[in-house]
Amino acid sequence: MTGSKLKGVIAAIATAVGPDGAPDCARSVALARHLLANGCDGLNVLGTTGEATSFSLSQRMGLMSAYHA
């Protein structure tokens, strides 16, 4: 791996939540795709908007899997 640096627009993305309070993977992925298609170079998921401590480990892993797919 080289010493490349992050650059461009990296958005802190909010996680969509369903009526039951669980993460809505489909809506979250749709938002991520929209942001990437419209100028964002990268996304900070489950980070600066506070969701990381609001969801269980399995919910966070499910979201990351959905974003990766």
Image (spheres, rainbow, N blue to C red):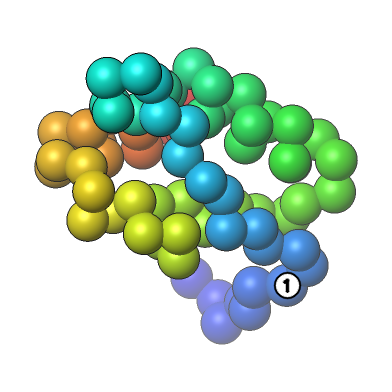
Residue flagged by tag 1: what amino acid is it?
Lys
Residue 65 visible here? no
Direction left: furthest residue = 57
Residue 8 visible, this orientation:
yes
Q: Is residue 39 left or right of residue 52?
A: right
Give coordinates of residue 45: x percent, y percent: 46, 51
In the image: residue 41, left or right of residue 61: right
Left or right position of 44 against 41: left
Residue that sits furthest to the front in the current view: 19
Residue drawn at (62%, 24%), measured in percent from left and top? 30
Q: Position of residue 5 (x, y in %)?
A: 63, 78
Residue at (14, 42) in percent of width and height: 57
Label 1 crowd bin: few (<14), some (14–19), many (20+), radius 10 Å: few
In depth, the one of 41 and 54 nearer the eye is 54
Q: Residue at x 56, y 82 (%)?
A: 3
Spot occupied by residue 37 in the image (x, y as percentages of width and height): 81, 35
Residue at horizontal 40%, vertical 29%? 17
Give the total number of marks visible in the rendering: 1
Q: Is residue 12 above or below residue 28?
A: below
**Residue closest to the eye, 5 or 30:** 30
- Spot the residue most to the right: 38
| 59, above or below 46, in the image | above
Residue 46 spot, x, y in % from top left = 39, 52
* Rendered view: 58 above or below 49: above
Can you identify the residue that label 1 sits on? Answer: 7
- Badge 1 element: loop
Q: Quadrant of residue 9?
A: bottom right
